[in-house]
Image: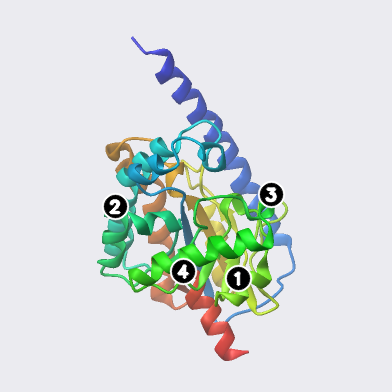
Amino acid sequence: MTSDAELIQVRRRRKGEDLSIFSQLFHLLYFALRRPKMQLECGVLITSIDIDVGSRVVGELNRGGNDPNVHGYLTEYRVGQIEEEVIPSLIEFYDVMQIPVTFAVRGQLTEVKSVVLDRLLGSSVKHDIGAHGYSHRTFTSLSESEAQRELELVSRGMKKLGIEPKCFVFPKNQVAHLSTLEEFGYKCYREEGGLGRDGMYIEKRGQLYDVHPGFHLGVTFNPIFLDKIIDISAKRRLPFHIWFHARDILETRGSTRKIIGQVLHPIYSHAKRKERLGTIRFETMHSIAEKLETTN
């Protein structure tokens, strides 16, 4: 007999499937009809993944007081537990595919023993390790001095691991204090996106590059139209930036592998075929910003 919890999960998955297909179709039509803001040498596929907690140990540091800053109904501990299970499989997938991606890491993760960071630093692919705040507080709610303190703590923790983050993903995508990011040596960030706000472009604001989001992969269970959007990127020589939270995959390790096989593998296999034709290349947020900086 199916439990109530299982029925709720099935309903949520079906709702997510419907939303995903609608969102993909909207983005496909929107990008096909929209006049391009830029043109590169070839299409570019960029991936960024948000690590909101990264470890169940980090999830215990704030003793529940920071839970609302991370998730609407899951505790930091639970999100950290999910990400500890999910992220190694994601790293393994991208390493096997030989695709570099941006992992936006929460600063507190650098202060504990972390399987996630060990795997990233030991990866066979040079992934971009960026920052995702220190304690996952929204930057729009921080004063200037509070934002500086967050970034100081991120830099201190990253430096111990030999990392100098150059890209920043704002917690909850709430963008603020860009001039402070510049002061700390960041080169790029991801702007807030969504229906009608996503785009296939990269734009310089001050000294920072907005590596603009193109599609949130979070509720996608059937990538029915995403290969067509990748085709637009290749044909028009545009950047396509897909992103998701590591915690978006709220299932067991076995289910994670199933979703990787059914969702991620088709998307990136299609892009790999374009790469062999020379019409798509893979970049991280930092690497594409760096290339634009040297060519402009």
Image quadrant occupied by the N terminus:
top left
Dividing the picture into quadrants, the one containing residue 200 is bottom right
As drawn, the label of residue 155 is 4
Residue wearing tag 1:
181
Image location of residue 161, percent across then percent down: 33, 69
Q: In the rendered view, would you say 155 is above or below 265? A: below
In the image, which is nearer the foreground, mark 4 or mark 3?
4
Q: Sequence order check: which comes first, mark 1 or mark 3?
A: 1
Q: CA distance from mark 2 to mark 4?
A: 24 Å
Asked whether, in this view, residue 46 is left or right of residue 81, the answer is right
Outermost bottom residue: 295
Give the mark nearest the N terminus, 2 or 4: 2
Amino acid at the residue labelled 4: Ser
Q: Is residue 64 above or below residue 167?
A: above
Residue ID at (56%, 34%): 72
Q: To which quarter of the image does residue 108 belong? A: bottom left
Q: Nearer the viewer, residue 145 or 224?
A: 145
Q: Is any atom of residue 42 visible in this view?
A: no
- Number of residues whose C-alpha sits closer than 10 Å to that of mark 1, classed few (under 14), some (14–19) or many (20 or more): many
Q: How is the image coloured?
A: rainbow
Can you identify the residue that label 3 sits on? 195
Mark 1 or 2, closer to the camera: 1
Among the two numbered marks 4 and 3 on one chain, the one whose residue lies closer to the N terminus: 4
Mark 3 or 2, nearer chain start = 2
